[in-house]
Image (tube, grey):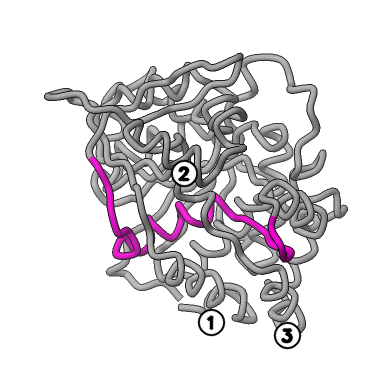
Amino acid sequence: MTDNHQPSVLVDTDTGIDDALALLTVLAHPADLIGVGAVFGNCTEQQAAANALTVLAAAGRTDIPVAIGSPRPGPTPAAPSPHGADGLGDTGLRPPTGAAPADDNAVDQILRTANDRPGNVDLLCLAPLTNIAAALAENPLVLSGFRTVTIMGGMGAASRRDTVAAALPKFLPKGDTNTNHDPAATARVAAAPGPVTWVGMDVTGQLQLPWGMLTDLAATSPLARFVHTISDDYHRYCTDTYAATEPIVTSHDTVAAVVMLDPSVVTSAQILTGHVHDHDGRSSLWGEESAGTASAHRFVTGVDYTRVTAHIKATLAAPNPSEAQ
């Protein structure tokens, strides 16, 4: 059930495993999810659209349109994705019969939403920013047409680089995943005016969900079982990458989704200007001090992880997202 006093949300995603949980978390909130745009990243843009339809169907929301957006601007990376070849853990899950992407284009969807509903829609970006940059090429002020723009991307404040290196030593050499897929798109978005909040990997990477928690929830909740199924191989990758002593799963995109849905979980943030840097062929966006620029954006530097986890548990414990509201 939708609360008419709640904001509407448009999501841009490359629908991998953490994107799936982020979408379910948005659906579990009273906010009205009005559309999904698909872009390459964890998989192709066509597969990302199919995955979004699969996730929406798992939540009983086949009414939400999914539009296909931009293809990858360069060659496909040689390294396999930890999300699997299909983005959802190679589990064979498919959209229900008859479910298909909308005739609309994801870039047009962004432009139309900003124009038709100025200041009334929150834009949540969980993927490479190629669709967003393409919309900016058509209308340089398009982001100003949204109530908020929340981006899962970047590595945080440059002034905290040493802190990030100590807390997440493997992240710096790998770069910021969404930026690395399309650095030029990230640079264009970072230079654009608008109510933009960046939730970087320095923040999202610190949420480690116990695999046992998800296993317990999966015993009684179909949604938790869905997420548990697609995360089975991914949680092993997360446990190994973080050198965790107990099995875990991470969900970068869901942290960004919760920040958008419940801004009170943010414990610290800085107003900075994003700059893309290349290091040994890997690109990252860092927020840097820059006085008086129109593109100064908000960079989240801390969140209440206990409350973020509570949002996730509420989403997964409900038989369907509407019961988590």
Q: Residue 214 or 73: which is nearer the viewer?
A: 214
Foreground disc of the pair 3, 1: 3
Residue 181 location in percent, x, y?
59, 25
Q: Which residue is mark 3?
A: 220
Question: Was residue 251 drawn as part of the magenta stretch in this picture?
Answer: yes
Tell me which residue sits at (52%, 54%) in the image: 206
Distance of mark 1 from mark 2, alpha carbons?
Answer: 32 Å
Which of the 4 image quadrants contains residue 71? top right
Pointer 1 residue? 323
Q: Quadrant of the C terminus?
A: bottom left
Q: Residue visible at 27% across and 69% down?
A: 5
> From the viewer's perspective, is the residue at label 1 or at label 2 nearer?
2
Where, by quadrant of the figure, is residue 110 drawn? Answer: top left
Residue under the image location 38 percent in, 57 percent down: 259
Question: Of label 3 and label 1, which has the lower sequence position?
Answer: 3
Element assignment for label 2: helix
Q: Is residue 317 magenta?
A: no
Residue 202 is labelled as 2
Mark 3 element type: loop
Counting residues from the N terminus, which is met first, the one under dot 1 or under dot 2?
A: 2
Q: Are marks 3 and 1 in contact (CB under 8 Å)?
A: no
Mark 3 packing: few (<14 Cα in 10 Å), some, or many (20+)? some
Q: Marks 3 and 1, how far apart in space?
A: 14 Å
Within 10 angstroms of label 1, few (less than 14), some, or many (20 or more) residues?
A: few
The magenta segment: 244-270
Earlier sequence position, callout 2 versus callout 3: 2
Q: Position of residue 62 (x, y in %)?
A: 63, 60
| In contact (CB < 8 Å): disc 1 and disc 2 | no
